[in-house]
Amino acid sequence: MSANTEPSGHVAGVQRGRASFVTQATRVLGLAGALGFAIAIAVALLSGCAGDLKAAVSLKVVRSPETPRDASVVIDEQYIGPLGVVAAHGVRLPVGEHRISVEKNGFFPFDQLVEADRQDILLRVKLEPVPD
């Protein structure tokens, strides 16, 4: 007498249905988790949480009216975001020396070294257009 290890049609259908539900749930949760992770990374980058928070300095950026809001801000060779967002929210920098660059096609790049040493930093950014 051999034992049948195959599930009956009804049981097999329930198991497939459960597997399908688990697969769908995993996809949805995976997408939600990935989205949450991406948002957390964006917030960390914009707030400067990549460094040691106990020893951090606030960087405030003021852009001149003729400087485009969509110019790219790069700190220590890492893209931070558009200038308008950085100017609105600021950035936290760990204590130490940092290179801040602001770039936009059609303008000369802005590049400055700053020393973050427990005092807040105010950086005034003005991009000069490249002459035709």
Image: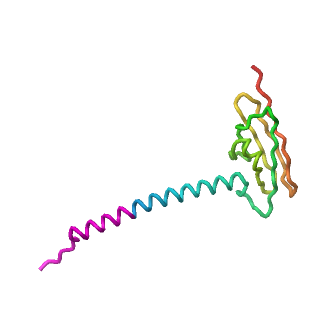
- Looking at the rendered structure, the number of numbered marks drawn on it comes to 0
- The residue positioned farthest toward the bottom in the image shown: 1
Q: Quadrant of the C terminus?
A: top right
Q: Is residue 5 left or right of residue 44?
A: left
Q: Return the x and y of residue 77 as percentages of the image width and height.
A: 70, 45
- Residue for point 38% across, 63% down: 21
Main SS of residues in magenta: helix
Q: Is residue 33 left or right of residue 1?
A: right
- Residue for point 30% across, 64% down: 16
Residue 94's place in the image compared with 3, above or below, is above
Q: Quadrant of the N terminus?
A: bottom left
Q: Return the x and y of residue 35 as percentages of the image width and height.
A: 55, 55
Image quadrant of residue 51? bottom right
- Residue for point 84% across, 41% down: 124
- Residue for point 73% across, 36% down: 103
Image quadrant of residue 39? bottom right
Q: Is residue 4 left or right of residue 28?
A: left
* In-front residue for pair 112/124: 124
Check residue 20 for magenta coloring. yes
- The residue positioned farthest toward the top in the image shown: 132
Image quadrant of residue 50? bottom right
* In-front residue for pair 116/91: 91
Q: Return the x and y of residue 100 as percentages of the image width and height.
A: 77, 44
* In-front residue for pair 13/116: 13
Check residue 26 for magenta coloring. no
User: Bounds of the magenta span?
Assistant: 1-21
- The residue positioned farthest toward the left in the image shown: 1
Image colouring: rainbow
Residue 45's place in the image compared with 129, above or below, is below
Residue 16's place in the image compared with 48, above or below, is below
